[in-house]
Amino acid sequence: QKEVEQDPGPLSVPEGAIVSLNCTYSNSAFQYFMWYRQYSRKGPELLMYTYSSGNKEDGRFTAQVDKSSKYISLFIRDSQPSDSATYLCAMSALQGAQKLVFGQGTRLTINP
Amino acid sequence: KAGVTQTPRYLIKTRGQQVTLSCSPISGHRSVSWYQQTPGQGLQFLFEYFSETQRNKGNFPGRFSGRQFSNSRSEMNVSTLELGDSALYLCASSPRDRILPDTQYFGPGTRLTVL
């Protein structure tokens, strides 16, 4: 069993929809949680970075962490075609990026 | 400021060959990390260099090696290629001596296909 599980999709939704992307994990020591966005033929870029449980909002994006359920989510409101990308969750017990464990990524398409 | 550049962008090799990939970090960045991305395993950490020294290494066989030069440019080498080495190899640079997710920037990757 992988430490981090993420549904690879693909997920296809109409423009304007609310998108929910999720990851589950098994290591209770994880306390740093990230979401990355990766466009085709590009490297990942950090979208959201949270520590411990709770919510974090940045524009149309909201990250939620539920450590009791070992479950993290990324919500995208008013989705746009430009949001079409692969979204990767990542997490670690320590702050260093070399310790990150990544999910497989969910391919998302927003249809105009 | 120019981003992280990786060369070549695409590469096709055959089993048993060896390959060298190159990464130029963002100007002023001294830390370079390498990752392997595959559909099955996702993104996995290979190793990290800072000031020409390997500081961290992931769980990969010794066929995977790297180095960093005094100008912070880095190369990674894979010897005796196997079919399973087909992947996107990503390089990331960071300005700090600790690689933190919010100060780490990825390049576009080198797509390696092993036939």
Image (cartoon, coloured by chain):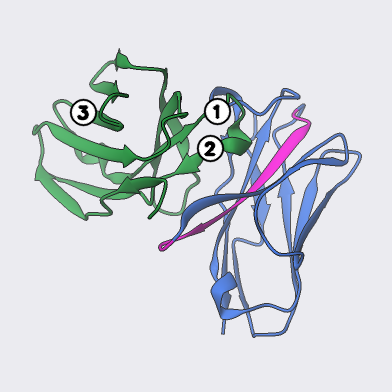
Chain colours: A green, B blue
- Which of the pair B35/B23 is nearer the observer? B35
x 32%, y 24%: residue: A67
Viewer-nearest of labels 2 and 1?
Answer: 2
Relative height, residue B48 to residue B111 (above, below) = above
Mark 3 burial class by Cα count in 10 Å: few <14, some 14-19, many 20+: some
* Chain letter, disc 2 residue: A
Q: Is residue B69 left or right of residue B62?
A: right
Please report the bounds of the magenta region as a residue range.
Answer: B29-40
Asked whether the beta carbons under mark 3 and mark 1 sit within 8 Å of each other, the answer is: no
- Amino acid type of the residue that numbered disc 3 sits on in the rendered structure: Phe
Q: CA distance from mark 3 to mark 1?
A: 20 Å
Q: CA distance from mark 2 to mark 1?
A: 9 Å
From this viewpoint, is residue A11 visible?
Answer: yes
> Which residue matches tag 2?
A100
* Chain letter, disc 1 residue: B
Mark 2 burial class by Cα count in 10 Å: few <14, some 14-19, many 20+: many
Secondary-structure class at tag 1: helix
x 26%, y 44%: residue: A84
From this viewpoint, is residue A56 visible?
Answer: no
Give whichever of discs 3 and 2 has the lower sequence position.
3
x 62%, y 79%: residue: B82
Mark 1 burial class by Cα count in 10 Å: few <14, some 14-19, many 20+: many
- The reply to the same-chain question for discs 2 and 1 is no
**Which quarter of the rendering shows the C terminus of chain A?**
top left
Question: In the image, is residue B33 part of the stretch drawn in magenta?
Answer: yes
Image coords of residue B92 (percent x, y): 63, 40
Image coords of residue B47 (percent x, y): 71, 47
Q: Is residue A77 left or right of residue B58?
A: left
- Which of the pair B105/B39 is nearer the observer? B39
Picture quadrant of residue A88: top left
